[in-house]
Image (tube, rainbow, N blue to C red):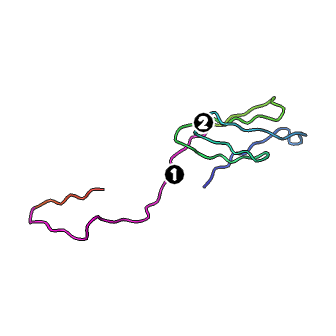
């Protein structure tokens, strides 16, 4: 489930609520801006800091983002032979 980072500009009745958001390392966390919202796309393991800056540049806030590897679900299993034989007491090694 995607995480949601909410930006709050104070006071609530501020005339200019626009902001920019940037990443300390775009190779780890890329910011794809769209108006006053953005989509954060994890690019690699590690950490990066997101910095939100008000349109007038007077205020900033930061959030550290740790990008974790996604779980990949198993979609099947197979073996490389259909059958084999072994003598009594012999060991058959099965490898992944």
Q: Quadrant of residue 52?
A: top right
Which x, y percent locates residue 65?
A: 60, 40
Decide: few, some or many residues near mark 1? Use Cα within 10 Å; few <14, some 14-19, many ≥20: few
Which x, y percent locates residue 4?
A: 67, 49
Residue located farthest toward the bottom when viewing the structure as drawn: 82
Residue 68 in magenta stretch? yes
Q: Which residues are magenta?
A: 65-89
**Quadrant, the N terminus:** bottom right
Residue pictured at 46% horizontal, 60% vertical: 73
Which x, y percent locates residue 8?
A: 78, 42
Question: Is residue 63 positioned above or below 94 on the image?
Answer: above
Lateral position of residue 93 relative to residue 89, left or right = right
Residue 60 in magenta stretch? no
Which x, y percent locates residue 86?
A: 13, 66
**CA–CA distance in space, label 2 to label 1:** 17 Å
Question: Is residue 27 positioned above or below 82 on the image?
Answer: above
Decide: few, some or many residues near mark 2? Use Cα within 10 Å; few <14, some 14-19, many ≥20: many
Residue, disc 1: 70
Lateral position of residue 81 relative to residue 62, left or right = left
**Earlier along the polypeptide chain: callout 2 or callout 1?**
2
Query: 34 and 64: which one is in front?
Result: 34
Q: In the rendered picture of this protein, how many numbered marks are placed on residues? A: 2
SS category of the residue bearing label 2 = strand
Residue pictured at 83% horizontal, 38% vertical: 10
SS category of the residue bearing label 1 = loop
Residue pictured at 59% horizontal, 45% vertical: 42
Query: 7 and 44: which one is in front?
Result: 44
Mark sitting on residue 27: none
Residue, disc 2: 48
Question: Is residue 86 positioned above or below 49 on the image?
Answer: below
Residue pictured at 75% horizontal, 32% vertical: 60
Is most of the magenta stretch helix, strand or loop?
A: loop
């Amino acid at each position: 489930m995607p995480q949601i980072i909410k930006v709050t500009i104070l006071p609530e009745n501020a005339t200019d609520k626009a902001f920019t958001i940037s990443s300390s390392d775009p190779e780890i966390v890329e910011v794809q801006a769209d108006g006053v919202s953005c989509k954060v796309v994890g690019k690699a393991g590690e950490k990066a800091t997101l910095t939100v800056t008000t349109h007038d540049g007077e205020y900033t806030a930061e959030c550290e983002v740790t990008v974790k590897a996604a779980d990949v679900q198993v979609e099947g299993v197979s073996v490389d032979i259909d059958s084999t034989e072994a003598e009594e007491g012999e060991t058959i090694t099965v490898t992944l």
